[in-house]
Image (cartoon, helix red, strand yellow):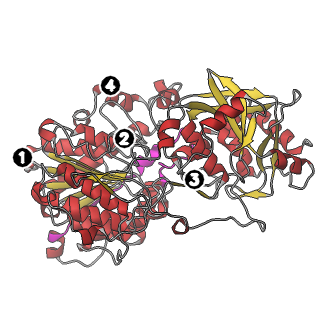
Amino acid sequence: MEIPTGSRTTSSSDLQKKRVGLLYDDRMCAHHTPDDDYHPENPNRIRAIWNKLQSSRIPQRCVVLDAKEAEDKYVLSVHSKKHVDLVRDISSKQFNSRRNRIASKFNSIYFNEGSSESAFLAAGSVIEVAEKVAQGELSSAFAIVRPPGHHAEHDEAMGFCLFNNVAVAASFLLNYRPELGINKILIVDWDVHHGNGTQKMFWKDPRVLFFSVHRHEFGSFYPANDDGFYTMIGEGPGAGYNINVPWENGRCGDADYLAVWDHILIPVSKEFNPDIIIISAGFDAALGDPLGGCRVTPYGYSAMLKKLMSFAQGKIVLALEGGYNLDSIANSALACVEVLLEDKPIAGSSEAYPFESTWRVIQAVRHELSDFWPTLADKLPANLISQTAASVPNILFSSSDSEVEDDNGTQRLKDLEEVIQPLSKLKVDEDGQDKVATPNPWRSELSKIDIWYATFGSNMWKPRFLCYIEGGQVEGMQKPCSGSMDRTPPKEIVWKSYPYRLFFGRDSSSSWGPGGVAFLDPESKSQDKAYLCLYRITLEQFNDVLAQENVSSHDMTSPLFDLAALTSITSKEPKFLDALPRGWYRNVVYLGNEDNFPILTMTCSHLDVMSFKSRELPLRGPCKAYAATLIKGLVGGGLLSEEEAMAYIQEASTKPL
């Protein structure tokens, strides 16, 4: 059903010339976490966009469409029957007792009673707008859908994605509506994460040119594999029709993206000459996004979109993918719809230069694809690629229970520009070809070593701990975490109790505000008992968590806790050591082994424990939000009932050290 709305005065010729479709449906808000726990991919994402468009009176200028569920046969064109059947049935009552267990087998997925309908609506909605744009009923359109889709693979949901909405719509146009004359489709994926699922679905298909620009960081950024590297160009008849632009670092902004448009995407698009463009429009590369760590502004998105409107007679479909800062995604989406309506970018400018690493990646991509796209064969002028911003080192930013405070209690928060250092100069091989820098060697070494990270505080609740791995924040936290370089979830989780004393101290923390946070006395006593959740992660990830727990920012060119340190505390006394010169959780403690993997936790230093005992440092119970997070962890782990967990925290808060 199609509903032209609003009272904006527009001539009939204007309406005929520019008919922009908008699709939004509240039914897609029914997909949420089973217990309404916080998750970055939540219903407020599409509500925020729709509310922003409404407050700007955008729907009155558009053709507003209702969502439609996709038919099985269209979804089956890119997904297996097993996967389609699972998503269709997962919300039924027969799955109530095992829904969560099934979700846990996938990578970053949850299911609830509304997931099935939402998934079919999201895929069907992108089909709906793509069909209307393809047949000329609409000039362009934006499908405000969720769950997102570009990570979903042929036989598997992953990365918040159930069905690959964009791939379903592209396959529909090519295979079910040939009479529309859509023979070549350009898919542009500007989500900050690589569109691994979409890439695989059209890997050998020359009818689809898939282009993805994303944070990659040599395979350490989600989805944390080599699929998004620039050497992945397609296969067989599809060779050259898969283009990846993998950022080596975060903080990429308008200048970086527009340089990629001007020197890769736009020249190739001219040669490809698509019949329609479908954009996997994730807005998690936007400035302020808690997971993306990039700096694209609404102007940047509008400028990228405007550059694409000169192709395919302006037939463009945007389908929402990621984006987890509600203000950022709302403002970015508004900027894009205004471009579709007005055919020009919103007011703004990009005066900065790209990073040196951006030019390095652009040149590598052009060289890799020059045999397929002659327009990329020419070398870029030296005076162009010499115009660079300062490069960005491997820096982690903390949102911890323990950020270092100076004497008057204010955070030593440094802006990134004050601590950035140039990356090593671009190395040129004897044949003159660009060489891509390699990541820090220690990461590769420590990524092969598994340890158990034992946590006794807010990290006992898995969604809170995943903030340190995947980035983001949970309800009650004052600010987001940056996440680890390797965002792979824990391989295993077990619970154990130990003869250590849990206590709460400090007046406040930057993550939770006023109130104490949890510590463990590193000296064991048989009469004490503390419950700990053990996450099996790599020693590389442990270093990233250690950094986020202790410092506002840290240049991770070397590990905080290396193999020598691990050998030291596991083989001789004492079984703990300070990994950093400062920080509330700088003391790494060895608790023994589990399945032949060392168990490590982190707490305050021995001197800090003595200061807490002497009351030089304040003992204080936790705030309500922090305590609630601990209770969720303890109850979710199946160790204690809610009443028992509350009593456990109460005792730790009041019992003298």
- Which residue shows up at 18% across the image and 78% down it? 11
Residue 450, image quadrant:
top right
Q: Viewed as shown, does residue 532 lie left or right of 289?
A: right
Foreground: 326 or 30?
A: 326
- Disc 1 marks which residue? 179
Q: Which residues are magenta?
A: 17-44
Tell me, yes or no, whether the two marked residues, 3 and 2, touch with CB atoms within 8 Å. Answer: no
Task: Identify the mark nearer the N-term, 3 or 4.
Answer: 4
Q: Is residue 37 magenta?
A: yes
Left or right relative to 541: residue 227? left
Q: Residue at image x 36%, y 63%?
A: 356
Residue 595: percent from the left, percent from the top?
62, 20
Which residue bears the numbered disc 2?
A: 119
Corner quadrant of residue 578: top right
Q: Earlier in the sequence, mark 4 or mark 1?
A: 4
Q: Amino acid at mark 4?
A: Lys
| Marks 3 and 1, how far apart at CA | 50 Å
Amino acid bearing label 2: Ala
Residue position for label 3: 481
Q: Which residue is mark 4?
A: 82
Q: Amino acid at mark 3?
A: Cys
- Of residue 243 and residue 75, the one placed in the foreground of this image is 243
Mark 1 element type: helix
Picture disc at residue 367: none
Which numbered mark, 4 or 2, is in the foreground of this view?
A: 4
Whichever of callouts 3 and 1 sits on the residue coming sooner in the sequence is: 1
Residue under the point 12% across and 44% down: 177
* CA gap, disc 3 and disc 2: 29 Å
